[in-house]
Amino acid sequence: MALVATVAVVGRTNAGKSTLVNALVGEKVSIVSPVEQTTRNTIRGIVADPRGQLVLLDTPGLHKAVGTLGTLLNRMARRSAAGADITCVVFDAAQEPQLEDIGWMQRIAKEKPEKVVFVLNKADKSPFFEKMFRDAWGEAVTGNGERNRPLWVGATHGEATKPSEASAEGTGNGERVEPLWVKSISTTEGGAKPVLDALFGFAEEGELLFDEDIVTDYPRKLAIADVIREKYLAHLHQELPHELGIIVKRVVDEGSRWKSEAEVLVNRPSQKPIVIGRAASTIKAVRKAAERELKEVFGVPVSLELWVNVEPNWMKNDRLLAEMGYLGGLV
Ligand SMILES: Nc1nc2c(ncn2[C@@H]2O[C@H](COP(=O)(O)OP(=O)(O)OP(=O)(O)O)[C@@H](O)[C@H]2O)c(=O)[nH]1
Ligand SMILES: [Mg+2]
């Protein structure tokens, strides 16, 4: 017997959820980038600790949905929150609360999950808007924070507040939710320790859910596709992140090495030269960077073959979305 819990890590896009999950697991299980909507699948990261085991569900950031893919991502985030023991909402507190942050607060205030951790992330940054987040929560609870009024007009910037006194009391019971507020610097393992302690504070005695030495059960094909997409995001920045889809067609295990073939989907013919690059420089650089990381992740050399195909409206094509794992099944 040990302390165990499943944790849905939710929050708006770019808040640092995947960074936090990686810090807590102590290994990279989820891709990270400064670009919005980096995470597209729910990824399970498993934390092994002398205290027990946490199963973290890293979800796509909640955002104003555009088109089928956007709607699916939002649904995936909400569904995982509903199924987990602990809801961990990550806020980018280096920015004032945004509509999506308020949206999560309102959802928590309404649905009253029993165990909630509010992470004020990016605590290494200044200004840091702790007070504004706490005020926003107060409004969400009292119902005074209407969704569409202009938020935070005239608010002062850069208020520095002391670390809050954590309290694990007052959870659930249909009365009022009292989230446990913690600060985190998720870019370092030690910086996320307050979150780890808060989560174990809520965990309960039970049987381990996974073998002790496993860090993720995310399917191999999807993990490879994610790494390729992360390298593309790093390479192309804002150029076409939302319209790039990766499907890993095959992974052949040849013992001492893996061979993998993947399709790079774009929405329009004009995007093809962008993902290929001049004299194929972009696709080569992405392939090399992805191969390097995959070798590290899987511990065997992985050779990648990438094809670029134009697939108009792939973001609305159920068959392709299913192939990318976006139609669920993991949660
Ligand atoms: N300075 C600082 N940057 C952070 C911290 N946590 C995350 N970041 C950065 O914030 C950016 C977004 O991080 P992600 O982990 O990809 O964010 P996410 O919430 O998973 O985003 P989606 O997958 O799009 O929902 C990255 O550039 C991270 O390096 C932190 O504690 N401090
Ligand atoms: Mg993410």
Image: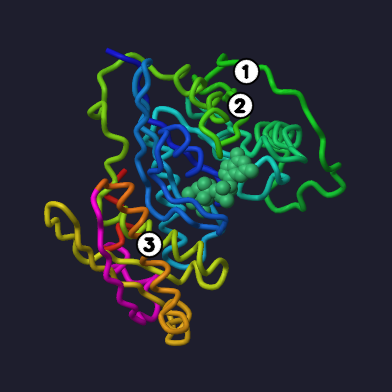
**Residue at (41% x, 80% y) in the render:** 280
SS at mark 3? helix
Q: Amino acid at mark 1?
A: Ala
Q: Quadrant of the C terminus?
A: top left
Verify whether residue 306 appears in magenta.
Answer: yes
Where residue 201 appears, x then y in whole percent? Answer: 47, 16
**Residue at (48% x, 29% y) in the render:** 113
Where on the picture, by quarter, is residue 251?
A: bottom left
Q: Amino acid at mark 3?
A: Ile
Measure the alpha-carbon separation of dots 2 and 1: 7 Å
From the image, state whether disc 3 or disc 2 is nearer to you: 3
Where residue 242 appears, x then y in whole percent? Answer: 48, 67
Magenta span covers which residues?
Answer: 300-322
Q: Residues within 10 Å of mark 3 (few under 14, many from 20)?
A: many
Q: Quadrant of the N terminus?
A: top left
Q: Amino acid at mark 2?
A: Val
Where residue 125 appears, x then y in whole percent? Answer: 71, 40
Measure the alpha-carbon separation of dots 3 and 2: 33 Å
Tell me whether circle 2 and circle 1 mark residues in contact (CB < 8 Å): yes
Q: Considering only vertical position in the picture, is 202 above or below 315?
A: above
Residue picked out by circle 1: 166
Residue picked out by circle 2: 182
**Residue at (36% x, 74% y) in the render:** 265
